[in-house]
Image: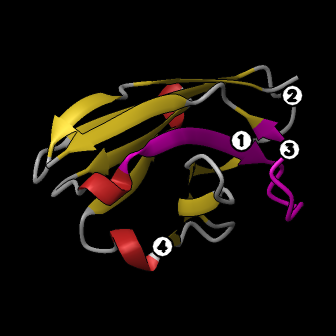
Amino acid sequence: QVQLAESGGGSAQAFGSLTLSCVASGYTYSAPCMGWFRQVPAKEREAVAVIENDRRKTYADSVKGRFTISDDPAKNTLYLQMNSLKPEDTAMYYCAARPCWSDEYEYWGQGTQVTVSS
């Protein structure tokens, strides 16, 4: 059973920065494909940034140029560097993982809250 543990959320001022981390453990197959998602109450969860099967990094239009996704396979850790934060970035952020042969994200972290004030 894959387990994901996020950290690094919190409060920031607009134009500030935060870095989220997610440590993956428990997978028995090759390293999963991973990504970051976010959700605000009464809205659907949206993909923020993901690392594709071919290692391409894709971003939501709303975060392009401000957020950077990266990983450290040696540490089984996924990161999300968030710069130039905006109040509309306020959300619960989730780390997610899937077997790279699957399109469906099967495993989810517990989430970490990011709150940006103006």
> Residue 40 bears which disc, if any?
none
Front disc: 3 or 2: 3
Is residue 91 on the magenta stretch? yes
User: What residue lies at 23% left-to-right and 57% top-to-bottom?
Assistant: 86
Evaluate whether residue 34 shows in this view. Answer: yes
User: What residue lies at 38% left-to-right and 74% top-to-bottom?
Assistant: 62
> Residue 60 bears which disc, if any?
4
Say whether marks 3 and 2 touch (CB < 8 Å): no
Q: Secondary structure under badge 1?
A: loop
Q: Quadrant of residue 104?
A: bottom right
Residue 39 location, x and y as percent?
Answer: 58, 49
Q: Secondary structure under badge 2?
A: loop
Question: Dot 4, how many residues are within 10 Å of its Cα: few (below 14), some (14-19), or many (20+)?
Answer: few
Front disc: 4 or 3: 4
Magenta part of the chain: 90-107
Q: Quadrant of residue 65?
A: bottom left
* Residue picked out by circle 3: 106
Front disc: 1 or 3: 3
Q: Considering only order in the chain, which callout, 4 or 1, is on the residue closer to the N terminus?
A: 1
Residue 38 location, x and y as percent?
Answer: 55, 50
* Residue picked out by circle 1: 31
Q: Amino acid at mark 1?
A: Ala
Question: Label 3 vs label 2: CA separation?
Answer: 14 Å
Residue 6 location, x and y as percent?
Answer: 52, 26
Q: Amino acid at mark 2?
A: Thr
* Residue picked out by circle 2: 28
